[in-house]
Structures are given as C-alpha cells and as structure tokens.
Image (cartoon, rainbow, N blue to C red):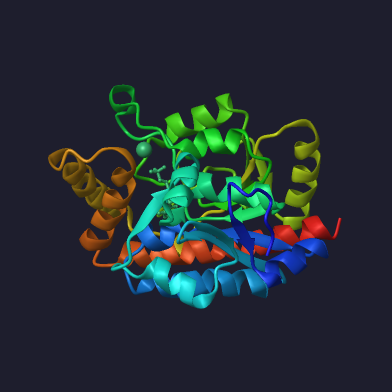
Amino acid sequence: MSQRSAHLPVVVSDEVATALAEKRPVVALETTIISHGLPFPTNREVADLCEAAVRASDSVPATIGIIDGVIHVGLNSSQIDLMADPLSSVTKASTRDLGAVVARGLHGATTVAGTIAIARHVGIDVMATGGLGGVHRGASESFDESHDLVALSRTSIVVVASGCKSILDVGATLERLDTLGVSIVGYHTDNFPGFYRHSTEFPIDWRSDTAADIARIFAGHRVISGTAVVVANPVPRDRQLDEALHDAALAEGLRRVAAGKVTGKAVTPVLLSAFAEFTSGVSVTVNTDLVVNNSTVAGQIAAELTSR
Ligand code: PSU
Ligand code: MN
C-alpha cells in the first residue's frame, strides 16, 4: 500500500510494491480493454491470460483500475471480476476522468492514457495493451482524436501495442505521433502493424528484433525525451483477421456509429463490438492473441530494463 497524495488515493498491491522496491520488473496492464473492449466472459479470461503472459516473462503484472474511488495498481482476482462484469457500472477512465472518478467514489477502467499516467506516478516503466487509440476516420470534421496520443507525448514509458486500432485513420495517427515526438519501434517488423491485421502499408523508421535492444533504445531515449517509446508488435500473419472480413466489419461498424450518432468515448467500444458481432467472435480471438503476445513482449522488455 502506498499513498503518494491524500487527494488521490493509490493502493499498490503488496506484490507490486515489493517488486518495485526491489527494482524487479513490473508491467502495467489496462482495464478499459476488459470493461469496454472485449465481451464477457472472454474479457475475464483475457485479463488472466495477460497476467500469466507477463509472469511467464519473469515480470510482475500490475493490472490498474479504480474501485470505489480508489486507484489500484495490481488488482486482485475479485476486483478484476468486478471490472469484467457487464452488470457492474464501470466508467471508461482516461486521464481527464481520474480526479472525478476518485472524487465520486466510482469504479473506473483505465485507458492507455489513464493507465500510463498512473503507472508513471508509481514508477512502472512498461505497459502492454492491444491497440493504441489515435486519430479517427473523418477527424478533420469530428476532431475525434484519442487522448492516448497526447498522453504518449508526455509520459516516459514503453508501451507495447499492435499499432493503433485499425478502425482509425492509421496514416494520420502516425503523423500525429511524429508531431508529438513519440518514438515507434517495430518489433520484428519494418511496417506499422494493423491491429487485427499483421501490417499496414505504412513503413516505420526503427526496427528491433530483441527485448534487450528495445531496453537499450528506451534507456537512451528517456534521458533526453519525456515521450513514450511505442513498441509496435504485430499479430502473427497466421492469426490475423481475414482482410475482406475485416473491411466488411469495419464498414458495418462505421455505419452503426453514423446511424447511432455515436460520439466521444463511446465510439471505440461501439466499433469493437460491431467487429465482434460481424465476425462472429473471430475479431475477439485475434484481439486476445495480440494483447497476450504484447504482454509477453512487455514482460521481456521490463526484465531487460531492470537487468541493465
Ligand atoms: N486495445 C484493445 N482494446 C481496447 C483498447 C485498446 O485491444 O479497448 C482501449 C484502450 O484503453 C485505449 C482505448 O486507450 O481503447 C482508446 O479509446 P479512445 O479511442 O476512446 O481514446
Ligand atoms: Mn475519442
């Protein structure tokens, strides 16, 4: 248990607190993917699979979420049950929401932005997620860009992700990451991954084939820049979503968003659930595979960082 500010209650589990104190590797995991990104009961299984993957890489998982207005770093099993239960009322919490969720005593599932803010606050250097938020299609009209982008620009942390979600405008998202000075390193790839798809048409400048190399890059990067290093780890080709099915599901999702006049933080969950329905759950399997792989790689990078 650690309390850094009376105004923002943060409870770090004993296991995570001990690991951090002993400078052993820790990986932060988010909860929006559990509460708002994947359907029940798969979401609950994925939470366990990600933690197990981090452990298999000799690191300690720290799943982050807010319960009754208290931020927890290292949720226990029954707390993760609550996050996964569609009947519990869990607010999607980006950085801007943290103060309000805490002040109101609510439950909150943290996004990439919310998770890295908390992770940095307690001294965690690595996070794993599925796909980053980014610039939405049609953003020149809607102005819909994920706060994840800005959060990555001001948080010194490694985030392992399978690119940004393919529901987004990938090219515009990459341009924005460039503007914001966020570093991108392809893991075993020269192209930016396409979330449900192994790769996009967009090349990236830096490629790395080992966790030790990524740890070296971040160790230097963090000295001179306060931005994140995004490790872009693609889903294996033989596990990716079929391209035609992907494009048809995306068209259906975008149709639903337009027809329902969906805006703000509901857009991404509506698109992901449209994919799940339209693909009869295949997209959920792909999302599971990629986030578990990302957890494995994050654990390896965290282990390399602490052994430096
Ligand atoms: N990766 C997934 N599924 C998700 C997310 C990431 O595989 O649901 C979540 C993350 O929490 C990310 C959020 O920060 O989606 C982006 O939401 P928005 O576009 O509203 O910023
Ligand atoms: Mn948005």
The quarter holding residue 33 reads bottom left
Q: Which residue is drawn at 52% across and 43% down?
A: 192
**Horizontal side of residue 65 vs 54, given as left or right:** left
The quarter holding residue 3 reads bottom right
Q: Which residue is drawn at 49% across and 61% down?
A: 290
Q: Where is residue 183 in the image (x, y as percent from the top left)?
A: 64, 36
Q: Of 99 and 209, which appears nearest the observer?
A: 99
How many numbered discs, if any? 0
Quadrant holding the N terminus = bottom right
Q: Which residue is drawn at 32% across and 61% down?
A: 89
Q: Which residue is drawn at 66% across and 44% down?
A: 207
Q: Of 163 and 141, which appears nearest the observer?
A: 141
**Horizontal side of residue 125 vs 189, given as left or right:** right
Residue 231 visible to the viewer: no
Q: Of 224 and 178, which appears nearest the observer?
A: 224
Q: Of 71 and 277, which appears nearest the observer?
A: 71
- Outermost residue on the right side: it is 308
Q: Position of residue 79 (x, y in %)?
A: 48, 71
**Horizontal side of residue 301 vs 201, given as left or right:** right
- Outermost residue on the left side: it is 259
**Horizontal side of residue 266 vs 232, given as left or right:** left
- Outermost residue on the front side: it is 6
Quadrant holding the C terminus = bottom right
Residue 223 visible to the viewer: yes
Q: Position of residue 268 (x, y in %)?
A: 33, 47
